[in-house]
């Protein structure tokens, strides 16, 4: 997509990678810039709160479709649930895995994980967490009737059993290190077994709600309008006692309306700032825009490998026809660096000191229109149709769709844009019927653990996140070998080989890497700035800025 990397782009990439690694802890910062765009700093945290506050409001770009942790597959539900429900482990703002509802895990043999649970933890209803609750919570991912979006994470699980009042043992059919790491994300969420049994199919919806252990409890859910949380007075972790008595999440789909709400002060803050508003938010006196560590990369996910894009030459040609520098400038106001691989540099937290070596070993994704035209002719694909989804959900989706259409026209492809309603865009990733007839979808593919192996799991045959049903026996065999390796550095080396296969086969076309973003109105501060907010109880840290 580009012929060379400018000095400014390289600086941005290195700063992003170094900061995300958390070498200096949560306070680490870096600076970078993208050509023609905005100079930016990356920091894991925002300034600490100076005191308590009665309440604050927060924007979500869409209403959560459910608060059932087994269906939490996108930013809106996880942004709420991070403060209400908890996992066996916890992702910290500097992208480390720390004890959570489990104080430790043991790995006595390659097929066994044993979790020692924290004692005295109370659910919001007042009952005490036991091993029975953990077993019931984890087993839901194995139940076909539940249809967990995280079922693939449990693909190697043979059994989940109570082996003591505060001990749970998972037995595997084959070694799987990634499963243990994912106990810090939605797969490791713990809910009251009694509440699950009582609510049944209503669990997680506005009628039933949830009963978890987090620093906030679910107070009200006004469908189509808002979700309100209130402080949990019996929360077990005194280091994260909420500074605000209540939090109100408001649903604002339109990016301009979301920005106006922040600027007017009617909403105090929000994650995932619209790229079109970066200039406004950086210059306002009504608050401050922050950029944080990110595991996400923006890619074009190939949803249909049986159509025109089933030919690797066509996928390569389309990749070569994309001017990533121009896309970054138009889509994210220059606050990004061109991608070199489907997974972002920020995803490589198990061996951060090796990240730059892995990426320097990768070939540049060249921008070559003539070469792309040649590949299209060789493939006999001139005039063939490719359908890409677009949506007003975020400005970058529209920008990328238009860029792909223009690039396709230059090289001889008939790229057609299919508009998708904002509230239906997420369904493209969870409902096969919703994505019928679509070849390409813009994704902001993030991982939920600090291990890049989680990202490349999505290209494994049969994985839930394998949207295009890509299948390569060589990739699958290497993945199975990698997930059995306990040593993080050795596992990262093997994951780098998976990355090379993914680049060779292009089941996803890399675009760019952007930092996470958050806007805080002038009266509040304290929120983590990075993507760890999806599983870390970020709202508990927000308090008065004065």
Image (cartoon, helix red, strand yellow):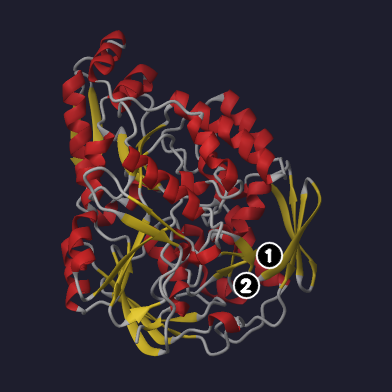
Q: Evaluate if marks 1 and 2 touch, with contact meaning CB atoms under 8 Å apart.
A: yes
Q: Position of residue 124 (x, y in %)?
A: 55, 83
Question: What residue is drawn where x is 23% and y is 33%?
Answer: 404
Q: Secondary structure at mark 1?
A: helix
Disc ID at residue 135 = 1
Q: Position of residue 361 (x, y in %)?
A: 51, 29
Disc ID at residue 502 = none
Residue 107 drawn above or below residue 57: above
- Quadrant assignment for the N terminus: top left
* Extreme-right residue of the structure: 108
Q: Secondary structure at mark 2?
A: helix
- Visible in this render: residue 222? no
Q: Which residue carries the number 2 mark?
A: 193
Q: Nearer the viewer, residue 531 or 60?
A: 531
Question: What residue is drawn where x is 59% and y is 30%?
Answer: 476
- Visible in this render: residue 498? yes
Q: Nearer the viewer, residue 388 or 28?
A: 28
Residue 68 drawn above or below residue 220: above
Question: What residue is drawn where x is 58% and y is 41%?
Answer: 354
Q: Is residue 42 left or right of residue 262?
A: right
Question: What residue is drawn where x is 32% and y is 47%?
Answer: 336
- Ranked by sequence position, the earlier of labels 1 and 2 is 1
Label count reads 2
Q: Quadrant of residue 400?
A: top left
Q: Is residue 460 left or right of residue 14?
A: right
- How packed mark 2 is, by other alpha carbons closer than 10 Å (few <14, some 14-19, many 20 or more), is some
Q: Is residue 36 left or right of residue 462?
A: left
* Extreme-front residue of the structure: 7
Q: Position of residue 323 (x, y in %)?
A: 25, 32
Q: Position of residue 18 (x, y in %)?
A: 49, 50
């Amino acid at each position: 997509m580009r012929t060379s990397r400018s000095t400014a782009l390289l600086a941005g990439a290195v700063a992003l990678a170094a900061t995300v690694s958390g070498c200096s802890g949560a306070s680490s910062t870096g600076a970078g810039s993208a050509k023609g765009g905005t100079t930016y700093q990356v920091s894991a945290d925002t300034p600490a709160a100076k005191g308590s506050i009665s309440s604050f409001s927060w924007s979500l770009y869409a209403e959560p479709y459910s608060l059932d942790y087994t269906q939490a597959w996108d930013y809106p539900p996880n942004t709420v649930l991070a403060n209400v429900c908890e996992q066996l482990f916890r992702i910290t703002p500097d992208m480390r895995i720390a004890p959570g509802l489990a104080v430790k895990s043991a790995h006595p043999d390659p097929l066994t994980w044993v979790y020692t649970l924290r004692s005295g933890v109370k659910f919001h209803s007042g009952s005490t967490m036991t091993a029975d609750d953990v077993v019931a919570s984890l087993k839901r991912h194995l139940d076909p009737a539940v249809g967990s979006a995280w079922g693939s994470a449990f693909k190697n699980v043979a059994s989940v059993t109570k082996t003591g009042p505060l001990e749970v043992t998972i037995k595997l059919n084959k070694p799987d290190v990634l499963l243990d790491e994912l106990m810090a994300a939605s797969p490791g969420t713990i809910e009251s077994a009694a509440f699950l049994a009582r609510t049944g199919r209503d669990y997680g919806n506005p009628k039933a709600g949830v009963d978890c252990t987090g620093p906030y409890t679910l107070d009200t859910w006004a469908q189509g309008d808002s979700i309100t949380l209130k402080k949990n007075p019996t929360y077990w972790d005194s280091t994260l006692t909420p500074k605000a008595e209540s939090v109100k999440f408001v649903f604002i789909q339109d990016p301009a309306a979301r920005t106006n709400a922040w600027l007017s002060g009617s909403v105090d803050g929000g994650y995932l700032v619209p790229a079109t508003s970066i200039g406004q938010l950086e210059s306002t006196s009504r608050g401050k825009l922050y950029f944080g560590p990110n595991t996400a990369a923006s890619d074009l996910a190939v949803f249909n490998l049986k159509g025109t894009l089933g030919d690797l030459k066509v996928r390569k040609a389309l990749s070569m026809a994309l001017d990533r520098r121009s896309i970054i400038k138009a889509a994210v106001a220059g606050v990004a660096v061109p991608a070199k691989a489907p997974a972002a540099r920020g995803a490589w937290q198990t061996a951060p000191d090796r990240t730059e070596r892995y990426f320097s070993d990768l070939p540049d994704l060249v921008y070559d229109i003539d070469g792309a035209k040649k590949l299209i002719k060789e493939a006999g694909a001139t005039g063939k149709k490719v359908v890409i989804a677009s949506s007003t959900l975020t400005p970058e989706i529209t920008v990328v769709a238009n860029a792909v259409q223009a690039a396709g026209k230059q090289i001889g492809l008939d790229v057609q844009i299919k508009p998708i309603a904002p509230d239906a865009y997420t369904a493209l990733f969870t409902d096969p019927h919703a994505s019928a007839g679509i070849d390409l979808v813009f994704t902001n593919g993030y991982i939920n653990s600090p291990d890049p192996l989680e990202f490349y799991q999505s290209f494994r045959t049969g994985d839930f996140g394998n949207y295009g049903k890509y299948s390569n026996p060589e990739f699958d065999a290497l993945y199975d070998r990698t997930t059995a390796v306990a040593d993080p550095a050795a596992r990262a080396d093997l994951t780098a080989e998976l990355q090379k296969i993914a680049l060779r086969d292009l089941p996803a076309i890399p675009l760019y890497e952007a930092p996470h973003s958050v806007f805080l109105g002038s009266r509040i501060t304290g929120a983590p700035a990075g993507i760890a907010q999806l599983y870390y109880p970020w709202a508990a840290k927000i308090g008065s800025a004065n």
